[in-house]
Amino acid sequence: MPIDHIRRRIESQFDALDVTRSGYLEWRDWKLFIDRLNTRFADSGTERHETLEKRFYGLWEWLRNQAEIDSVGRISRAEYIDLFLGFPRDVASEPWSRVAQPVADAIVGVVAENGDGRLDEQEFADYLTVAGFGDVDVAQVFRDLDSDGDGFITSAELGALIRDFYLDTDADAPVAQFG
Ligand SMILES: [Ca+2]
Ligand SMILES: [Ca+2]
């Protein structure tokens, strides 16, 4: 079943985010993710730090509103998987306008060293490690993404990768490595 590739990626993503290994995504997990990003990319007191917190707090609010959050404010593994498996194929529709490109913009805005709006291979590798995808063959994914071969990937290219992450059923696609 082609959908299995997508499911595995979403499962991997959940497991990377569920730092406390509770089987639920809670604020505490998300805060630890933000802390990891801050530690690697944004010293406290800097504008980048502020931007990072604002954007990733916003993402948590979005997740809370989308997924069926129980009374103690946590998302189960099944709820998380159902949420993303249920995304429409039409990438022009909600909720895509809230997820793929805004997330890519947030990542690039925080990770790109000099705020030039694009990532080199090292920055891309650093982000994947922090996000729990350290096992991916970064060089290969980066080559596939960097279609014009200038050594950088743009926010738009990263947005496309994020959409493919949830939609691409091709076992040979670059994003197939994430499962
Ligand atoms: Ca947890
Ligand atoms: Ca490029």
Image (spheres, helix red, strand yellow):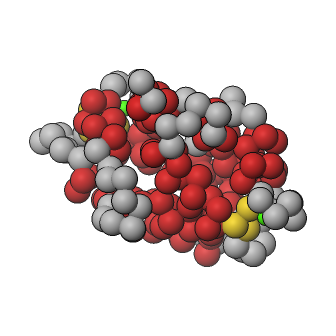
Quadrant of ligand 1: it is top left
Q: In this image, 76 relative to 53: left or right?
A: left
Q: Residue at x 47, y 60 (%)?
A: 100
Is residue 23 visible from the viewing direction of this image?
A: yes
Most distant residue in the right direction? 150
Q: Residue at x 74, y 62 (%)?
A: 153
Residue 177 horizontal/vertical position (percent): 64, 32
Vertical position of residue 121 compared to residue 114: above or below: above
Is residue 98 visible from the viewing direction of this image?
A: no
Q: Residue at x 65, y 62 (%)?
A: 157
Residue 4 horizontal/vertical position (percent): 43, 27
Q: How many marks?
A: 0
Toward the viewer: 145 or 54?
A: 145
Toward the viewer: 10 or 176?
A: 176
Q: Residue at x 41, y 61 (%)?
A: 91
Q: Quadrant of the C terminus?
A: top right
Q: Quadrant of the N terminus?
A: top left
Instruction: Using the rendered view, name the quadrant where residue 111 is placed.
Output: bottom right
Residue 125 horizontal/vertical position (percent): 74, 45
Residue 156 horizontal/vertical position (percent): 61, 67
Instruction: Using the rendered view, name the quadrant where residue 105 is placed.
Output: bottom right
Vertical position of residue 138 compared to residue 105: above or below: above
